[in-house]
Image: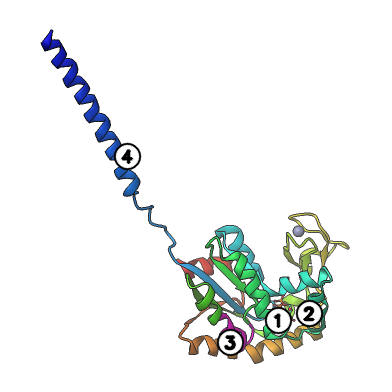
Amino acid sequence: MSCFCRHICSLSNLLFLLIALGTAYLVYLKIHKPAPAKQVHEDKIIFAFLGAPGSGKGTLAKQVVQELGYKQLSTGDLCRDNIKRETDLGKKLQEYTSKGALVPDDVISSMAKEWLDVNTKDGKNIILDGYPRTANQAELLLNMIKTFYPDYKLRVVSLNISDDAVVERLCGRLMCSNKDCGAIYNIKQFVDIEHPVCATCGSPLIKREDDKEEVIRERLKIYTQTSQAVIDAFKKAGFAVEEITIEDKNPKEVFEAFKKMIA
Ligand code: ADP
Ligand code: ZN
């Protein structure tokens, strides 16, 4: 009988020991959580795309958004959105955009900051499309990143194309009227069609108000005057300017060149 008791006793001791060990292990796991798997892309990057109007910055940015999951800040789109919604800001912006003139730096910078405040939260890489466009905007941007988004690194990418190629492209540019789609086409693709529609979403295609030859030439003149100053501002701050040659490349080839650059 006493032998049987001893068995029961040692069994319950064993059980107790097992429970105690199990609990201790669970507590240990809770304290020493295994380190999360190392992220493949640890760096959060803001890519500033520099390129003349019509260089294809916007088209490349859209591909990068779709294929690689980046986000795109297009200050031109922000301007057009405000103008379309007829906001107070929109009325002010239209005075500049309709002439192809640059919107003042403080207005553009605060629009950009408002967008970045919201869109840096998930840590996705970002493309700046058409911003910064003056040396002052570049300096304000560098300060903004340092102060408010210190986890982000900046890479500056210049898309190089000649003026003649730009004029030919932009005079025939058509864009989808559906702003959630924003697909871009060229009139050459629709020679026999009177009312071309978007192949992606079926919305009518429209010509941008500022895609007229005299406005294009004005935008190109401004771009040439200001882009060197932007590049100089970045170089002065210690940033290398990476280059992609656009001239004869189609959108797919430009995207391939970008992927090679970030690989
Ligand atoms: P594009 O690159 O074809 O010139 P965008 O869509 O980038 O056109 O910009 C359209 C217009 O919006 C510009 O002509 C300018 O008036 C205004 N704009 C956009 N981005 C900026 C910026 N960073 N600084 C000043 N003005 C801007
Ligand atoms: Zn569309």
Label 3, residues with CA under 10 Å away: few <14, some 14-19, many ≥20: many
Name the kind of residue labelled 3 in the image: Val
Q: Secondary structure at mark 4?
A: helix
| Sooner in the amino-acid sequence: mark 2 or mark 4 | 4
Q: Is residue 218 visible?
A: yes
Q: Nearer the viewer, mark 2 or mark 4?
A: 4
Q: Which numbered tag is attached to residue 230?
A: 3
At x 76%, y 86%, the residue is: 101
At x 38%, y 53%, the residue is: 37
Q: Which residue is mark 4?
A: 26
Helix, strand or loop for the magenta stretch, by majority: helix
- Whether 134 is among the magenta residues is yes
- Say if disc 3 is inside 8 Å of ligand 1: no
Q: Nearer the viewer, mark 4 or mark 1?
A: 4
Q: Secondary structure at mark 3?
A: helix
Left or right of 186, for residue 194: right
Q: Which residue is mark 2?
A: 93
Name the kind of residue labelled 2 in the image: Leu
Label 1, residues with CA under 10 Å away: few <14, some 14-19, many ≥20: few
Marks 2 and 4 sit apart, C-alpha to C-alpha, by 61 Å
CB contact under 8 Å: marks 2 and 4: no
Q: Which residue is mark 1?
A: 107
> For the magenta stretch, what is the residue range?
133-141
- Say if disc 2 is inside 8 Å of ligand 1: yes
| Sooner in the amino-acid sequence: mark 4 or mark 3 | 4
Name the kind of residue labelled 1 in the image: Val
